[in-house]
Image (cartoon, helix red, strand yellow):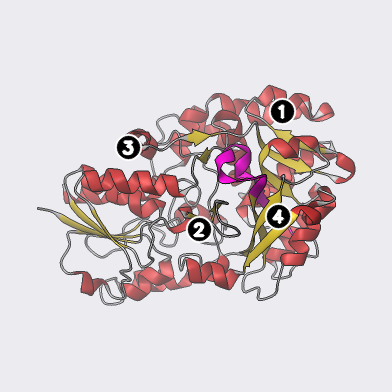
């Protein structure tokens, strides 16, 4: 029987394992930690019975993708929940902007930018099923829907700063800035509009859902389905050398490129190891897990119903923060991505206490404490927030890497999203998953389509392996 091993049990590693097991390959997953899931774990980080997502909390592409259609995780008990407001961006003085599932309803609230938001997001939203199918693939493929893909293609190449000029109101520009900041890069970078456009259209088309019971529910469903197909997950099993795993027809590496180069030192070609070692990591995140009495008292009311809140002020402030971080400087007012998953999944809280997760963008290698800066940003737009916070648990970039070695230096998106790395990954080949060693593939978020695709990269890497096997 064909044998495969998967190193790492993050969403992409489990997706690769499921894809291979469904093709009747004997698969074993090796995970160094005591629990599976990588960036999709959940836990009681602040107080008992308050459930926090430890990294990924919202899953725009998880409900309808090539991987989601191939494997019915809902048959294993997975359930999705949506907030009323997908994301919000508060401004000073109780003003702000927010996005709901409807492009039209979102646009109407933007006043003078109504027509511009409709014109920018509407065409992508209307064909987003086929557009998402196209861009959640490696760059080198023959498009099945080239005209639909072109709707994204005319928007994605521009720097986010250029796209921002389309909007005239402070609210419209701020709403765009929050989306663009998900790319962890300066707004002047080419292609920095790509991630913001995709996430914005996904919010309208699919929403930004959460998994009921935490992101760990996705992992539990994937593991359950995988084991029903005969697969095995070995926890507390770090891999230091691929040769220790014994002979395998397929080896899938759900790791950072540098880790792949290290554990594959005696297997991978020299050129591949050099490319993986040259792979650049981007800015880091500084995380705060908060336990809050009664939720945060946002002045901008829609933020109280939002699953995600972009806490950074105006477009100019957000752009400055991202520019400083990309230059290695810590901004006084950082961009803070704040998750209120309890808005969609109330069972995550108890007795009036709710969990809130904050991620500030900080420079690569940042060793300071961003706690005060994060809480200052929250208090700025939610006066009285500090009085409601009953527990604070910080996690520095070093802590984040220690918890998940794939997040090198606290880089939670697994690599700098420069144009080349965003499109091609760490090794510039037609097949971005192949390592050049027979049967060995990289399947982490470092390869296309990148982070946030919820298993698509692992699924596509496994399909590449199966094609070569056949």
For disc 2, the neighbor class at 10 Å (few under 14, some 14 to 19, many from 20) is: many
- View extreme (front): residue: 351
| In the image, residue 118 above or below residue 35 | above
Q: Distance of mark 4 from mark 2, alpha carbons?
A: 24 Å
Residue 259: quadrant of the picture: bottom left
Image location (x, y in percent) of residue 364: 62, 70
Residue 264 visible in image: yes
- View extreme (left): residue: 1
Image location (x, y in percent) of residue 244: 22, 74
| In the image, residue 378 above or below residue 126 | below
Judging by the rendered image, the residue that carries numbered circle 2 is: 421
Judging by the rendered image, the residue that carries numbered circle 3 is: 71
Nearer the camera: disc 3 or disc 2: 3
Judging by the rendered image, the residue that carries numbered circle 4 is: 336
Query: Is the C-beta separation of discs 3 and 4 under 8 Å?
Result: no
Nearer the camera: disc 1 or disc 3: 3
The residue at 79%/44% (across/down) is 297
Query: Is the C-beta separation of discs 1 and 2 under 8 Å?
Result: no
Image location (x, y in percent) of residue 405: 46, 68
Q: Secondary structure at mark 2?
A: helix
Image location (x, y in percent) of residue 354: 65, 47
Judging by the rendered image, the residue that carries numbered circle 1 is: 106
- Magenta span covers which residues? 334-354
Query: How many numbered discs sit on the rendered protein?
Result: 4
Q: Earlier in the sequence, mark 1 or mark 3?
A: 3
Q: Secondary structure at mark 1?
A: helix
């Amino acid at each position: 029987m064909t044998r495969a091993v998967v190193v790492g049990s993050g969403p992409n590693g489990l997706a690769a394992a499921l894809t291979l097991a469904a093709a009747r390959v004997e698969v074993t997953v090796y995970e160094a930690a005591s629990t599976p899931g990588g960036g999709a774990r959940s836990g009681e980080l602040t107080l008992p019975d308050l459930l926090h997502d430890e990294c990924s909390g919202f899953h725009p592409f998880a409900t309808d993708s090539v991987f989601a259609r191939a494997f019915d995780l809902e048959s294993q008990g997975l359930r999705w929940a949506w907030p009323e407001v997908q994301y919000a961006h508060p401004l000073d003085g109780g003003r702000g902007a927010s996005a709901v599932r409807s492009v039209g309803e979102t646009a109407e609230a933007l006043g003078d930018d109504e027509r511009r938001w409709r014109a920018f997001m509407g065409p992508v939203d209307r064909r987003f099923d086929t557009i998402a199918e196209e861009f959640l693939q490696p760059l080198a493929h023959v498009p099945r829907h080239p005209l639909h893909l072109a709707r994204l293609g005319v928007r994605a190449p521009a720097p986010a700063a250029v796209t921002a000029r389309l909007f005239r109101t402070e609210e419209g520009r701020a709403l765009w800035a929050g989306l663009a900041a998900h790319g962890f890069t300066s707004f002047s970078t080419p292609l920095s509009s790509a991630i913001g456009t995709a996430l914005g259209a996904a919010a309208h088309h699919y929403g930004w859902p959460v998994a009921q019971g935490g992101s760990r529910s996705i992992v539990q469903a994937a593991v359950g389905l995988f084991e029903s197909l005969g697969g095995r997950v070995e926890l507390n099993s770090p891999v230091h050398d691929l040769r220790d795993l014994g002979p395998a027809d397929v080896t899938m590496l759900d790791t950072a490129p540098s880790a792949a180069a290290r554990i594959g030192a005696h297997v991978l070609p020299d050129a591949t190891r050099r490319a993986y070692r040259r792979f650049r990591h981007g800015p880091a995140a500084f995380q705060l897990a908060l336990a809050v009495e009664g939720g945060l008292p946002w002045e901008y009311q829609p933020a109280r119903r939002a699953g995600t809140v972009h806490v950074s002020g105006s477009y100019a402030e957000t752009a400055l923060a991202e520019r400083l971080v990309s230059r290695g400087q810590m901004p006084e007012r950082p961009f803070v991505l704040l998750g209120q998953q309890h808005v969609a999944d109330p069972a995550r809280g108890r007795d009036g206490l709710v969990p809130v997760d904050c991620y500030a963008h900080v420079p690569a290698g940042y060793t300071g404490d961003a706690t005060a800066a994060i809480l200052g940003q929250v208090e700025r737009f939610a006066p009285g927030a500090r009085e409601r916070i009953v527990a604070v648990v910080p996690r520095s970039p070093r802590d984040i890497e220690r918890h998940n070695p794939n997040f090198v230096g606290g880089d939670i998106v697994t690599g700098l999203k420069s144009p080349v790395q965003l499109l091609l990954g760490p090794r510039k080949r037609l097949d971005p998953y192949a390592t050049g060693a027979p049967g060995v593939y990289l399947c982490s978020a470092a390869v296309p389509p990148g982070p946030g695709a919820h298993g698509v990269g692992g699924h596509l890497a496994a399909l590449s392996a199966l094609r070569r096997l056949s």
